Image: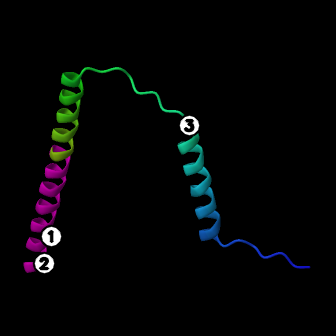
Amino acid sequence: MRLRKKSPLERMLRTLGGSLDAATDAKLSVPDVSSSKARRAGLIAAVSAVGLTAGSAGISSLRRRSEAGRDDS
C-alpha cells in the first residue's frame, strides 16, 4: 500500500486551517476604553496609514522619474 504525499499547497492550507481554528477558539479580551480614546486611536491609525501610503507613492514617483530620465539619454 503506497501513501500519497501532500503537495506543498495542501500542507500550507492545512497549516493555515489549523492556525485559523486556534485563533477562533481563543477568547479575546477587549480592554475597557472610553469612546473618545478609541476614536482618537482610530484617527491616529488612519492618518498613519494615509501618511505611509502617500510617502510610498511619492518615493515610487521619484524612482520612476529618475529611471525615465536615464532611459531618455
- Residue 29's label in the rendered image is none
Q: In the image, which is nearer the foreground, mark 3 or mark 1? A: 3
Q: Are marks 3 and 1 in contact (CB under 8 Å)?
A: no
Q: Amino acid at mark 1?
A: Glu
Q: How many residues crowd around disc 3 within 10 Å: few (fewer than 14), some, or many (20 or more)? A: few
Q: Are marks 2 and 1 in contact (CB under 8 Å)?
A: yes
Question: Is 67 part of what is drawn in magenta?
Answer: yes
Q: Secondary structure at mark 3?
A: loop
Rendered residue at 53%/44% (across/down): 24
Q: Which residue is mark 2?
A: 71
Q: Position of residue 22 (x, y in %)?
A: 59, 44
Q: Earlier in the sequence, mark 2 or mark 3?
A: 3
Q: Secondary structure at mark 1?
A: helix
Which one is nearer the viewer's eye here, 12 or 29?
29
Say above or below: 51 vs 64.
Answer: above
Q: Which residue is mark 1?
A: 67
Query: Residue 43 appears in which quarter of the rendering?
Result: top left
- Considering every residue shown, the one lying at the far right of the view is 1
What stretch of residues is rendered in magenta? 51-73
Residue 13 visible somewhere in the drawing: yes
Q: Secondary structure at mark 2?
A: helix
Which one is nearer the viewer's eye here, 45 or 20?
20
**Is residue 27 left or right of 8 when viewed as pictured?**
left
Which one is nearer the viewer's eye here, 24 or 71?
24
Q: Earlier in the sequence, mark 3 or mark 1?
A: 3
Rendered residue at 56%/37% (across/down): 26
Q: Amino acid at mark 3?
A: Ala
Q: Which residue is mark 3?
A: 26
Query: Residue 36 appears in which quarter of the rendering?
Result: top left
